[in-house]
Amino acid sequence: MLIGIDVGGTFTDGVLYHEGSILNTVKKPTVARKLQESIIAVLEELLRGVKEKEISRVVLSTTLVTNLLAAGQEEKTALLLIPGPGLNLRRMNFFPSAYFLKGAIDFRGRITEPLDREEIVEIAGQIKAAGFRTAAVVGKFSCRNSSHERQAAEILQERIPDLRVVKGFQVSGQLNFLRRAVTAYYTAATMDKWKGFATDITSALRKRGLVCPIDILKADGGTMPLEASLSHPCETVFSGPAASVMGAFALTRDNRTSVVVDIGGTTSDLALILQGQPLHASKGAILGGRYSSIRSFAVRSIALGGDSAIRWTGKDIELGPDRLGPAACFGGPAATPTDAVNYLEGGILGSLSSSEEALGKVSRQAGMAVKELAESVVAMVTGRLAAEIKEMFKAWEQEPAYRIWEIINKQKVKADRIVGIGAAAGAFVPALAGRLNCESFVHAYSPVANALGAAVARPTVSLLLHVDTENGTYHLDREGLAGEVSYHFRLEDAKKLALQQLQRIAGLRGIGQYADRYEFFREEQFNIIRGWTTCGKLFDIGIQIAPGVIDEFKGVQA
Amino acid sequence: MKKKSEKTGLVFFPAFDWAISPTHPEREERLLYTRDQLFEEGIMDLPQIVQYQPRLAELKDIARVHFCVPDIEAQAGEAHRIAAGGALVLADAFMTGKIKNGFALIRPPGHHAMRVVHGNRGFCNINNEPVMVEYLRQKYGLQRIAIVDTDVHHGDGTQDIYWHDPDVLFISFHQDGRTLYPGSGFADETGGPLAQGTTLNVPLPPGTTDEGILFVLDNLVLPVLEEFQPEIVVNSAGQDNHYTDPLANMSFSARGYARLNEKLAPDIAVLEGGYSVETALPYVNMGIIMAMAGIDYSNLYEPDYKEEYSKENPARLKQLAETVQRLNYVFSRRQELVAAARKKADSFFRKSRYISYDTDQIHEQQTETLINCPDCPGYLLIESEAVGARQGDAKIFCVSIPLRSCRRCRREALDLYAKTRRQPYEPYHYLYLQDRPADVYLQYDYITKKERAY
């Protein structure tokens, strides 16, 4: 049996899944300050009448890190940057309190300017005096050569032995110094609190008699063991939308193109599954208002939901962006888009008379019939969603491509269907699909698809390998593992090396069974030519276990 | 009307799957380190920058500029059409007010491609800037355009295309043609008889530095642009003036390029050459983007850069001052020069020349006839014969009607095309018509007796 729990901003959802059926679902309000309690409360209900040892996996998707960052509760962290030539970050106010170090590494991983030990010793003194307990050290091109980051961290820790230092190469191997700096900074700043949460939740679950693996859902739609998340807390941000997308993925499981529409109370999240592959954001998740190197799904959030308040401005009908409470048909104070659907469909959702009464108040102000108002509201909601969906497709088509075949082969992809997720999806998705001329897909378990998505998402691992045969070196992201290669190293050797490393890491994480589901998402080979002769090769290999569902998942009976 | 935008548009199309040959300077690796530098810098994440995806230029976009032998498809592969399309995407974004300026970081380059294209010369088949300029004229009605070519090689293709066009100001500064490919671009090349003074060439002595190039910019290029008042300024942004370029001998730095770009303030810059793929391009491209986007570039430098590299030697400065003075004089008297040429000539101007294609090793013999018209820039007739072309030797005849031609000239030119087409024997392999006022482009094949419209 599998358990998935998605801690959302308003509700915490849970499902218990076993061999093709959902045995139990739970929905409880989230208590923001006590996430552990919300999780345990949902877990208790799911476990009712179930033997603990039958549970083979628990997956959590939590907003803890997102909340910490939103509330500005991250730990005070010193950011040390080794920028070398390029943007003048000192004057750009990129991170107001950053320290800048001498030293530079170029795109081939060559040191073009040495570190200045004295300077670092002096900064260590300042950091100590300012009372920082954590620090992040990030150098430009540290994904090609991490020695400057390591040396600087070492000097800091010599001087301040209890300082926790996160190094840029540990959080990302992608080329993007700014995003790596953002990610390393917030990783350092949230690590301690995340560790506290992880320890608490592990002991609570173990105390409850659960002996199974505990996994965490990441922003990219994959899971990782709770243990592995200790060094990468930021990977858990935006796992809520990721849970919904994985839910839609699990409920559909084919190679068609879907728009995932998750309609909540005040906001709606839109995402794309293109020919069976969930689409990732090209720029990475936003942390503290800046792009990071955290891979996440391309999710578009709009301030319009099933509970958005309907008002007459004197000229127009206005929807939201605020929520006054639940829909009138569920005892709420004001008319909402949910009431408009409820009224038009003859009370299929809740109290017809409450919806009619609440809509009546607005329609009298507007001087129109209730039916006319309700129809306008539904048209407005589906109109906004449809417009956003078109924009999403357009944005995807316009994403930069760097090879001829990408441009020639990027045919226009059209949506085959709209997959509704969330409690209010059933009310709007059919009309929206009609408007966009595609199928509507609303599953009986759409309201808890997010928790299902968490329960059945499989682990993901992604690695980048950079090989430079002229320098005779290779560099692996994340762990900063580096080594030597011969001049005769070929693309096939590079791929083999990347695969071995993926298998090793999967083994360490206890997810070895998925290591054979790898795919190469990048295979680049360039000749290094000086004058008219080849003097080496560069390889960039990306290998991953892509998002998907675990082997135990056999679909869901409606 | 144009709305104000604060953004700099960027098309980055490194064509990682296209090369002339595996070890050729124009190969896959060329923009690899530039990509690494731009991506690692994270400059595309800044709010000042908006990245665009290139598109495939239409065949018609190319037909507006070139007479391709045997046809456009043979000369313009997908890579060429995407490179040109990258410039077109930025042109649209600029004209619709989505960007304040734009940089098309594209390859393959184009500024050695002339009107008639039998093959590749100087790594170029299709000339990206003129394709964009003619598109701007047709789609947005622009008339006066300036192209400033800052590549180290003379932009002889662009010069050829606008040689007779008084509405396009073409300024090129480059390493002296006596010491570098293509061996042209001397100060006395100042435009065709009816377009005198709207082509300006500044040959730079080998070794010219930041200071020398900026001297030319300040004392010739900027004042001339001010006087010409173009509706749009295009920069053919070659990067081979750099002190590390393997194919040339100049001493320009990344910061010098940034300064140049900041002063010139082009509306659209299009990458041309630049083959110091590792020691120059990553830094120069960063510099150009930073300058265009108004980003502080004071922390940008090559790892081995030293301040003294920028200083100019006085003898060279003196030489440059003389050239600049001479060209300013020609430019200021351009109308008198055109009037005098018109008066002196008969009903037409004719010139014959030999054109060499270094990359494809083709020999072309060309005769160009420009009709001397008192009311318009006149229409142009080209007879061209090539030996050594991959597709076989070909002889062609082209009729080109400029956008601003008078009705009489256009009528005459259309009649001439029709008459030539009807000839019973086969005087040429192909016959071409470039009717820019009607935006109609025809090609007639004498063997198959088929006419094709682009």
Image: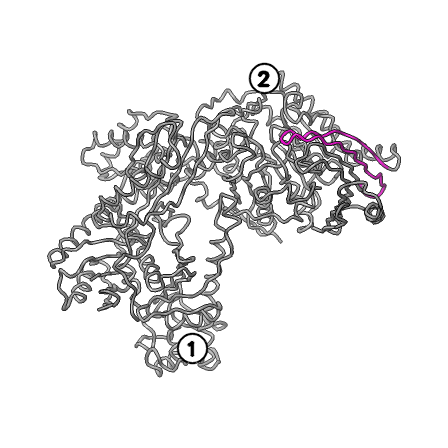
Q: Position of residue B314 (x, y in %)?
A: 61, 16
Q: Residue B184, percent across and down?
A: 69, 26
| Residue B96 visible in the shown view | yes
Q: How is the image coloured?
A: one colour
Whether residue A376 is situated above or below residue A451 in the rendered picture: below
| Helix, strand or loop at mark 2 | loop
Q: For mark 1, what is the residue?
A: A362
Q: State if disc 2 and disc 1 touch (CB < 8 Å).
A: no
* Residue drawn at the location 18% of the way across and 36% of the way down: A162
Query: Which tag is nearer the camera, tag 1 or tag 2?
Result: 2
Apparent side of residue B53 relative to residue B110 in the rendered image (left or right): left
- How far apart are the alpha carbons under marks 1 and 2? 80 Å
Amino acid type indicated by mark 1: Val
Q: Is residue A297 above or below residue A142?
A: below
Please, what is the dominant secondary structure of the magenta stretch? strand
Residue picked out by circle 2? B313
